[in-house]
Image: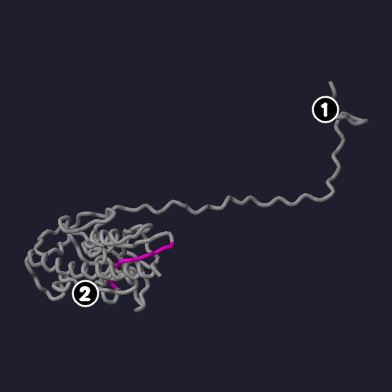
Amino acid sequence: MMPLFRRGAHGTDPPARPAPSEPLPPLMPFAPPPVMPSLSPSVARFPATEGDLACRARDCSNHTGVLCHYVDRRGRRCDTAWCPNHWATVGGIVYCRRHAGTIAAIGYFDHPSGMPDVDNRAPSLVNWVGRDLDAFVAATLVQSATQGETFVREPVVSTHADRSGGRRYERGWKLVDHTGLRLVVAVFVVEGEETTIRVRVGSGVVAEGVPPWIERHRRGIEVTEETDRSQRALFYAFLQKHIVAAVRANRAVDQTLQQR
């Protein structure tokens, strides 16, 4: 067998290795690996659904209420309490009915600008009126659509900066084609005038008014259910009349421009 190494001339040990041309760097002291921050999100805790507070609902004597969980952009919380018979929920969280309407209107995910002020009814009002007008506006726009146009419904209330300096809450319905937006109908409320519903068709406001149920609440007036239904019907008939007239006018202008 061949030797694994050549023996020296005067012994059995291998020759000494030559010294390295450069000194080896000194050993660095041992450092433990850095502790990485946890990337797991914080655990959400399901809030209590039964408490011991007096329910705010009229003529309700229950003392099983919990506070509304709404918190606005300024960190203020709704201080009303509601029992299981009178609260509303969105995403499994308990709210008073007004703020449930706000959350349902703009979505219950985080918003960069924060939730509307705790006393602002604008988003829920837009969502309520938009829901009641939805079928009518959709049918009106679909019937007026020309070849190549598609109807689009905005599913939630959107937030915009208004010319007044505040915010505007709006829900819209559109006709679009390959060139972009052809016609829009929208209902909106300006933050500083949160009881007034306005309707925009195209670029112009065509109708506005305070809904009768809000006017009654503001003045402390109570009416029968029949009177309430009658007043609501009159309010929506007023809005529908002006929506139809404005859609027809806009479509007539479009047709005139296409014929030139």
Mark 1 secondary-structure assignment = loop
Q: Amino acid at mark 2?
A: Gly
> Quick one: 17 or 123, which is closer to the camera?
123
Residue plotted at (25% across, 70% down): 245
Q: Which quadrant, please, contains the N terminus?
A: top right
- Numbered label tally: 2
Q: Amino acid at mark 1?
A: Leu
Residue plotted at (38% across, 68% down): 259
**Residue furthest out toward the front:** 260
Secondary structure predominantly adopted by residues drawn in magenta: strand
User: Of the residues under marks 1 and 2, which one precedes in the sequence?
Assistant: 1
With 33 as the anchor, is 167 left or right in this view? left
Give the residues in magenta: 179-189
Q: What label does residue 209 carry, if any?
A: 2
Indicate the position of residue 93 as horizontal and vertical percent values.
27, 56
Q: Which quadrant, please, contains the C terminus?
A: bottom left
Asked if residue 92 is positioned above or below residue 137 in the image, the reply reads: above
Splitting the image into 4 quarters, where does residue 173 fall?
bottom left
Q: Say if residue 39 shows up in the picture.
A: yes
Splitting the image into 4 quarters, where does residue 249 fall?
bottom left
